[in-house]
Amino acid sequence: MSIEIKDHSSSKRIKVVQIKETDLDKLIFPFNKHSIQSLEYKPFSRFSLAKSVDDVFSGELSKVLNNTLKDRNTGTAIVEPDIKNSKFDKDFLVKLSTALVYLVGLPNFDSMTGKYYARFHVKHSDSSDSYLRKAYRNLDLHTDGTFVKEKTDWLLMTKMEEINVKGGESTLLHLDDWEHCEELSTDPVGKENFTWGSPKSKNIEYKVEHPVFSQDKNGKTIISYIDQFPEPKNMKQGLFLQKLSDALEQSKNKLVFPLKVGSAIFSNNYFWLHGRTAFKQDMNLSRELLRIRGVFADQN
Ligand SMILES: [Fe+2]
């Protein structure tokens, strides 16, 4: 079975992988072999789940995902399963998301939930300590894993549910499309070590040090940045971060688009930044997201 790949309407850098209902049907049987609990408790079961998905597509899906995520010119895949039929429930999406990430590598332990993945809601009211769940505020462009010791090569975000939602579009920006990349990545302050902490809900007891900008093995600029968690040591660092934040949010090349329920954004975390626009006020707003972050692995 071949898969359909298109360029996303907002950018050729984003490859859209559409999965038809007839192909999703073929996943039901292998998915029934694994409960969510067994996937959580037995890491090896996630590999067999992933293999069964790749077999449905004759090995093409793992190739497309790996090529797209590792290529500097692309770096983001959006996987769009046709889940209109209610037989494709939330457990199905957890399993599909698990399979997708195991086709490119290994997930990091998510300290926020104590699992290899996290599911969380955005609702009308919120008492949490970060912008992640604040519905009526922009989640500014950022990368993930800025305040942890583990490498974060990629992240996957699956939209599990959306009720009474207006706004809350996905935002993405590729570093090579950003007008201020050259100016800010060559500023000496951007290469200084910053201290990165995190609020209590993240369950990370330590702080890390790293610069905002560095270079990959090919000499290309990469970024590790989120607005809330760097702790500037002085005026120079504080002003640099303000300039950086403004230059990212004001970029004319920021992509803003709606993401369908069931779809997953799968992005390289070194040269793509991600975020979300504010939701429109609604007392009954509810949106659920699943996220998995991790590292690339050899497929041999
Ligand atoms: Fe994020």
Image: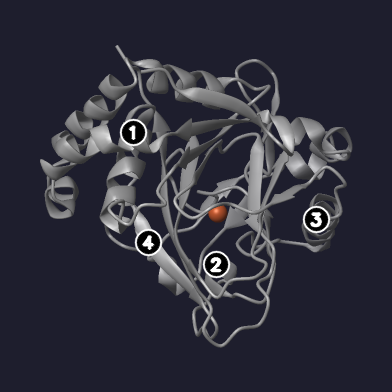
Q: In this view, does 284 lie to the left or right of 36?
A: right
The structure residue drawn at horizontal position 37% and vertical position 35%, both measured from the top left corner, is 100
Q: Residue 119 carries which label?
A: 4
Closest to the observer: 47 or 17? Answer: 17
Mark 3 touching mark 1, by CB under 8 A? no
Mark 2 touching mark 1, by CB under 8 A? no
Amino acid type, mark 3 = Glu
> In the image, residue 182 lies at what x, y percent?
86, 32
> In the image, residue 231 lies at what x, y percent?
65, 63
Closest to the observer: 57 or 72? Answer: 57
Callout 3 environment at 10 Å: few (<14), some (14 to 19), or many (20+)?
A: some
The structure residue drawn at horizontal position 70% and vertical position 61%, both measured from the top left corner, is 232
| Mark found first going from the N terminus, 4 or 1 | 1
Q: In this view, does 30 lie to the left or right of 63?
A: left
Asked if residue 200 is positioned above or below residue 204 in the image, the reply reads: below
| Mark found first going from the N terminus, 3 or 1 | 1
In this view, the mark in front (4 or 1) = 1
Amino acid type, mark 1 = Thr
* Element on which disc 3 rests: helix
Callout 4 environment at 10 Å: few (<14), some (14 to 19), or many (20+)?
A: some
Give the quadrant of the C terminus: top left
Question: For the residues marked 4 and 1, what is the alpha-carbon distance in whole angstroms?
Answer: 27 Å
Q: Mark 2 points at which residue?
A: 132
Question: For the residues marked 4 and 2, what is the alpha-carbon distance in whole angstroms?
Answer: 12 Å
Question: For the residues marked 2 and 1, what is the alpha-carbon distance in whole angstroms?
Answer: 35 Å
Q: Name the residue under label 3.
A: 249
